[in-house]
Image: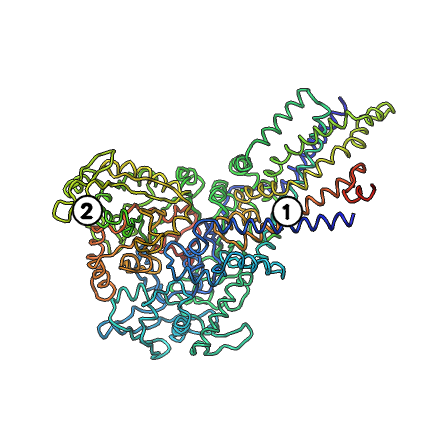
């Protein structure tokens, strides 16, 4: 297990390094350059040269990259010349907000998707299966942006049930006004349920056809017992993998939600950094998201092995040969 | 079947639990503003993030200066009077009208009786503090223009705590000097004359090394935005508001400065600036009425929703800024430069721009026609009727006549060509060969619907006189990267026409002389326009008491850029319960000390 973890971590580092090099290179291909974008249309060549000098943007690209990387290695992610803040400080403020939004939404989505998927599998081919399938497909194919606007229009503008914007201010304000988080959470939950429930449904159907299910039935185990004690555990394995790898998807979902509900999280931070050519922030977010994605993948592998004893981690399998 | 029902119940319970947990508090439509707090919506990308008034170009914005710093730190001369005109408001200024003498080369400034919130008076030493810091750190101040303040200041003398005399390097137009130079001065409190947070206050600004150290200290403090709400430096204010809370995403809460010594004491206890991540989110909040800003805005693409917001308790008020809109023609392009250098071709092109149609169409009525460098709106004492009416209003017939009378064969919906080359009367002009076509490439910024619609209409309008526009769109950053003065041989001079969707805002230079725009070689003369007569006229507006009339009318005739309608700065949505907001400042500043709520 330890050898496996070490090898995966080394791979992760390599992947992260490559990702940052690619993002660094691509960001420098953006037209215009940050100096003009930030100083405005009437900035003189002297102003632009001074800005580039002050922000270390006048050296060769490899030197600029090395400067950034060496800063990262010492814990310094750089300084946003657009937002006038250290990148680490920005991430510290925005990341908890996004993590909370994404985390609670995904947990809710799974909590709903599991019984829904299970129910559909049991009712396969019947009218209610088709009905639920239709609803989930509609949700799956509806853009998060549209879902958010619909929820606002109905629950906020017309019915005045929930606020149209997320809590403002620091992270702690979320807990002082939880009702303001309902619509953002509901938006991500609704568009995420469908993917999870479809996986659960097909996974449960696969499991229901297995010999051990017939064996359990023949031994007189009740249907709920079979489903909850035997089938569900095995059917959840692919969902765990899906969860681990869905981080980028969830983050892109939060971007839309942050945009619509005035919730300044890390997704929007990355988007704005890209459009304003705020390189330090862009690279900082890429690094953090990259780490989270790789970690998510790693955790999914480990969880998969723990959930399903038939699966062995590569190193263990290798050792057993 | 029973099992299925059970499973269905599980799913239903989960859904209900979600909703039940969510219904923490029912809300009703109401404004965010309580009787003592007013909230202003900050559009995306306009959040304040720099508090020290001597700021670099990266932070030089309306959001930082006019809508953030000025709430606490007042300028020597306040632009924007009670009628919403872009003129000095004596009542709001820290000093009485300056007195010019010695052929307008000496300025005497007398301060009014203002005090800092720590009880000390605002004195000439505070003005000198600003000047001393600026002299040493001018390259780091965004509004600094070589040759202008403080370069044009020979010396200053403090006569007493309220009076000081500035000796200039030459004669200057008093209006220009007051508006475009003195109004940039922000007296700084003595409490800031220190080089470290724990160090003593001194006269460090009086030496070069000291002024540098103080500037670096204050700049570093201004880069520590997490401390904005608590740093004792920023608590010493001479304005009506004191920052008490600031969040890194731009959320700012100001408390009324009870020691404010200006003419209008705040009636509200708090003023809040609330940042929005998108126009969509801001409009949703206005529509819902729940915790909605008292002073918001209607995104221009959603202008049709004005009536809905009216029913929500808002009044729609266009906010016209003090600026001019235009797009650029490159006078130095090796191919089309000779065409652009002919005034009659520029005048023909201006005659093909249907500004009233743009106003009623893409701009949905939110803007004003603009035919020269001095804006018509907001009302101001400078605009002349000749420029206001426009010497070259929309008239395809005029455009065609201009071309044919200069030797062109006009082909509507085709390409007009030069039939009579040469520099004589009735001929095409210098550098234009026979058969040359009137074809131009025009690059405009993508992403702005209004600009895109205007450019498509323009293509059609230009074709009426056989002027072919080849339109391409590109990202805004790509467009503005080309805005650098160039010579014909330089690679970056290949652009022919550019429209980034803006123009010039007279913020730094509220007296609209255009010395930075159209004078030969000036820093912001991106179209490379050069005209000796124009230079002479512009210089007169800066150095003599010549009025702006000659300048503005000359430029309206000259068409150094193609004038376009001036859109509003913002379509404001103001709660009907909030009063005292109007008129909105022409330089886009906020004065919530005038605001109050009705029951």
Which residue ends up furthest to the top in the rendered image? A126
Relative side of B88 to A224, left or right: left
The chain to which mark 2 is attached is B
Which residue ends up furthest to the right in the rendered image? A219
Residue B253 seen from this side: no
In this view, the residue in front, B236 or B366, is B366
- The quadrant where residue B21 appears: top right
> How far across and how far down the image is residue A262, in percent?
53, 46
In this view, the residue in front, B555 or A222, is B555
Residue A66 seen from this side: yes
> How far across and how far down the image is residue B142, in percent?
40, 62
Q: Which mark is residue A100?
A: 1
- Up/down of B48 relative to B573, above or below: below
**Circle nearer the viewer, 1 or 2:** 2
In this view, the residue in front, B198 or B82, is B198
**Colour mode?**
rainbow
At label 1, counting other C-alpha atoms closer than 10 Å, the crowd grade (few under 14, some 14-19, many 20 or more) is: some
Q: Which residue matches tag 2? A: B344
Dot 1 and dot 2 within a common chain: no
What residue is drawn where x is 61% and y is 35%? A190
The chain to which mark 1 is attached is A
In this view, the residue in front, B251 or B386, is B386
State the separation of the CA atoms marked 1 and 2. Answer: 63 Å
> How far across and how far down the image is residue B381, in percent?
24, 56
Q: Which mark is residue B115?
A: none
Quadrant where the N terminus of chain B lies? top right
Relative side of B434 to B65, left or right: left
- The quadrant where residue B230 appears: bottom right
- Up/down of B341 relative to A187, above or below: below
Say what secondary structure mark 1 lies in. helix
Say what secondary structure mark 2 lies in. helix
> How far across and how far down the image is residue B423, in percent?
15, 49
């Amino acid at each position: 297990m330890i050898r496996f973890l070490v090898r995966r971590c080394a791979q992760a580092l390599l992947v992260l390094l490559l990702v940052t090099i690619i993002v660094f290179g691509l960001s420098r291909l953006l037209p215009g350059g940050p100096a003009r974008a930030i100083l405005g249309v009437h900035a003189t060549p002297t102003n632009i040269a001074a800005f580039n000098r002050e922000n270390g943007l006048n050296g060769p690209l490899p030197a600029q990259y090395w400067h950034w990387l060496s800063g990262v290695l010492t814990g310094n992610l750089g300084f946003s010349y657009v937002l006038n803040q250290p990148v680490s400080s920005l991430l510290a403020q925005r990341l908890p907000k996004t993590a909370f939004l994404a985390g609670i939404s995904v947990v809710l989505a799974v909590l709903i998707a599991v019984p829904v998927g299970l129910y559909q599998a049991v009712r396969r081919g019947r009218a209610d299966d088709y009905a639920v399938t239709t609803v989930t497909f509609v949700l799956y194919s509806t853009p998060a942006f549209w879902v958010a606007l619909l929820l606002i229009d109905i629950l906020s503008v017309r019915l005045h049930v929930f606020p149209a914007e997320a809590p403002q201010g620091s992270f702690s304000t979320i807990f002082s006004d939880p009702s303001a988080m309902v619509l953002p959470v509901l938006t991500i939950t609704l568009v995420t349920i469908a993917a999870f429930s479809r996986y659960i449904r097909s996974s449960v159907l696969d499991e229901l056809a297995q010999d051990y299910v017939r064996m359990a039935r023949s031994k007189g185990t009740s249907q709920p017992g079979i489903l909850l004690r035997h089938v569900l555990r095995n059917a959840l394995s692919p969902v765990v993998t899906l969860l681990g790898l869905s981080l980028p998807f969830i983050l892109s979902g939060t971007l839309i939600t942050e945009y619509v509900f005035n919730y300044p999280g890390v997704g929007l931070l990355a988007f704005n950094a890209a459009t304003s050519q705020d390189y330090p922030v862009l690279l900082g977010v890429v690094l953090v998201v990259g780490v989270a994605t790789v970690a998510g993948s790693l955790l999914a592998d480990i969880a998969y092995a723990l959930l399903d004893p038939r699966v062995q981690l590569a190193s263990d399998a290798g050792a057993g040969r | 079947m029973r099992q299925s029902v059970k499973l269905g119940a599980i799913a239903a319970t989960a859904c209900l639990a979600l909703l039940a947990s969510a219904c923490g508090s029912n809300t009703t439509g109401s404004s965010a503003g309580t009787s003592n707090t007013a909230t202003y919506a900050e559009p995306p990308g306009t959040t304040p993030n720099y508090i020290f008034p001597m700021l670099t170009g990266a932070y030089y914005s309306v959001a930082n200066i006019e809508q953030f710093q000025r709430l606490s730190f007042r300028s020597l001369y306040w632009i924007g009077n009670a009628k919403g005109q872009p003129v000095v408001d004596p009542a709001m200024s820290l000093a009485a009208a300056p007195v010019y003498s010695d052929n307008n080369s000496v300025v005497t400034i007398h301060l009014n009786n203002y005090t800092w919130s720590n009880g000390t008076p605002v004195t000439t030493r505070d003005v000198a503090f600003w000047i001393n810091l600026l002299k040493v750190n001018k390259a780091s101040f965004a509004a600094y223009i070589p040759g202008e303040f403080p370069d044009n200041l020979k010396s200053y003398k403090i006569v007493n705590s309220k009076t000081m005399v500035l000796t200039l390097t030459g004669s200057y137009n008093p209006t220009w000097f007051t508006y475009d130079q003195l109004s940039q001065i922000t007296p700084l409190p003595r409490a800031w004359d220190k080089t470290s947070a724990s160090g003593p206050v001194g006269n460090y600004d009086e030496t070069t090394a000291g002024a540098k150290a103080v500037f670096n200290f204050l700049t570093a403090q201004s880069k520590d935005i997490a401390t904005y709400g608590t740093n004792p430096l920023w608590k010493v204010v001479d304005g009506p508001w004191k920052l008490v809370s600031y969040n890194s995403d731009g959320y700012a809460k100001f408390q009324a400065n009870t020691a404010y010594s200006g003419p209008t004491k705040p009636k509200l206890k708090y003023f809040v600036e609330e940042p929005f991540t998108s126009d969509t989110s801001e409009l949703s909040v206005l529509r819902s009425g729940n915790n909605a800003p008292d002073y918001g805005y209607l995104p221009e693409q959603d202008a049709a929703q004005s009536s809905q917001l009216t029913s929500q308790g808002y009044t729609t008020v266009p906010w016209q800024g003090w600026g001019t809109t235009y797009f650029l023609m490159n006078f130095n392009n090796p191919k089309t430069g000779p065409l652009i250098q002919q005034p009659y071709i520029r005048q023909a092109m201006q005659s093909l721009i249907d500004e009233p149609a743009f106003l009623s169409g893409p701009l949905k009525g939110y803007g004003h026609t603009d035919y020269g460098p001095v804006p018509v709106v907001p009302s101001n004492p400078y605009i002349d009727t000749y420029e206001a009416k426009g010497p070259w209003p929309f008239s395809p017939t005029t455009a065609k006549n201009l071309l044919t009378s200069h030797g062109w064969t006009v082909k509507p919906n085709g390409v007009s060509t030069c039939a009579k080359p040469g520099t004589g009367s009735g001929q095409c002009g210098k550098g234009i060969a026979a058969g040359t076509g009137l074809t131009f490439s025009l690059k405009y910024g993508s992403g702005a619907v209004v600009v895109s619609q205007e450019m498509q209409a323009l293509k059609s309008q230009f074709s009426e006189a056989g002027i072919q526009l080849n339109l391409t769109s590109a990202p805004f950053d790509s467009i503005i990267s080309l805005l650098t003065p160039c010579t014909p041989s330089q690679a970056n001079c290949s652009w022919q026409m550019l429209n980034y969707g803006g123009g010039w805002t007279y913020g730094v230079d509220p007296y609209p002389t255009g010395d930075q725009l159209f004078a030969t070689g000036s820093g912001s003369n991106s179209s490379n326009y050069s005209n000796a007569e124009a230079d002479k006229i512009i210089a007169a507006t800066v150095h003599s008491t010549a009025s702006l009339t000659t300048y503005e009318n000359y430029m309206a005739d000259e068409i150094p850029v193609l004038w376009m309608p001036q859109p509003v700065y913002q379509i404001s949505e103001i709660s009907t319960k909030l009063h005292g907001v109007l008129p909105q400042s022409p330089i886009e500043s906020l004065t919530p000390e005038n605001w109050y709520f009705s029951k």
